Amino acid sequence: MRLRLLLFTLSFYLALSVLGCTSKPSSDGSTDTAAGTDAQDTTGKSGKESKERKEPKEAREGKERREPLVVRAGTAVTVSLGSAIGSKLSQSGQTFTGSVAKDVLVGSVVAIPQGATVSGTVTDAKPLGRFAGGAVLQVRLDSITLNGSDLRVETGLRTFSAKGKGKRTAVLAGGGAAVGGIIGALAGGGKGAAIGMAAGGGAGAGGAAFTGNKDIVLPAESAVSFELSQPLEVRR
C-alpha cells in the first residue's frame, strides 16, 4: 500500500515537472514575438514621422520653384533690332522683330535672358516733307518670347523726331539726349549710323542716322531701350 502511494506521489510530481518545462519556452516565445511586434511598430512609426517631416520641406521648395518672377514697372528692356526701321522705311502699324540685348534681372536671378526674341510695332512713321516740323518715328515693344510662349508686355512709346529740312538735329522724346544721332548724321549715312550708336549708347538713346535732307533710320542691330509701364510676371 505504501509502495503504491509512493509511486503515485512520484508520478504526480514528475508530471508537474514535465508540464512546467513544456510551458516555459512557450512563454518566452510569446515575449519575443511581442517584443518584435513592438519594435516593428516603433520602426514603422519612426519612418512615417520622418516622411511627414520631409514632405512639407519638399512642398515648400517646389512652391518656391514655381513662384513667378515679377519684373517691376520702370525696368528697362534693351532690344537689338532685327532689321532697319525708319520714318521713311516703315509704315504706321508695321511690326518689327529683334532680340533682348542684355539680361534683365530680378535681384540676382535672370528673368529675361539675353537673346530672347521680341516683337514690336511701328506706331507712327512720317518722313520729311510730309508734315510741318520734320520726320517722326515712334515704336513700342509688344511681346517677348520666353519658354516657347509669347509674353505680352506693356511699355512706353519711344519717339524719334527730326526737325525740318536743313537742320542737323535729332531729338529722342523723353530721352533728353541725341548725341548718337547727331554724331551719326555728321559721320554721314549708313556707317555713320553705327558710329552714332556707339557714341550715343551711354545717353540711353538708340542710334538714329540722318542729316537735314535724310529721314530717321534705326539700322539693324541698333539698341533701343523700352521701359516697362506695367509689372511683368515671368513664370519659371
Image: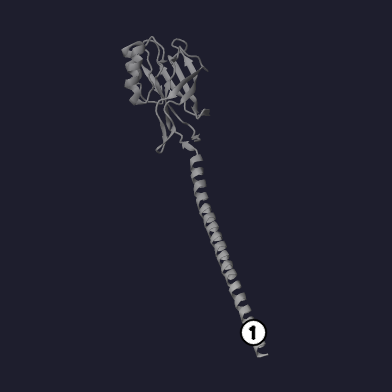
User: Which residue sits at x=55%, y=58%?
Assistant: 45
Percent across and percent down for residue 156 are 47, 27
Q: Is residue 128 above or below residue 123?
A: above
Percent across and percent down for residue 66 are 51, 40
Q: Quadrant of the N terminus?
A: bottom right
26 or 52: nearer the viewer: 26
Q: Is residue 128 above or below residue 107?
A: above
Q: Is residue 61 above or below residue 87?
A: below
Residue lying at the far bottom of the rendered structure: 2
Res. 182 visible in picture = no
205 or 20: nearer the viewer: 20
Three-letter code, disc 1: Leu
Residue at numbered disc 1: 7
Res. 41 visible in picture = yes
Q: Secondary structure at mark 1?
A: helix
User: Which residue sits at x=59%, y=70%?
Assistant: 27
Based on the displayed image, in which of its 4 quarters is residue 98 positioned?
A: top left
Q: Residues within 10 Å of mark 1 (few under 14, many from 20)?
A: few
User: Which residue sits at x=55%, y=59%?
Assistant: 40
Label count reads: 1
Percent across and percent down for residue 115 are 43, 25
Percent across and percent down for residue 22 are 60, 72
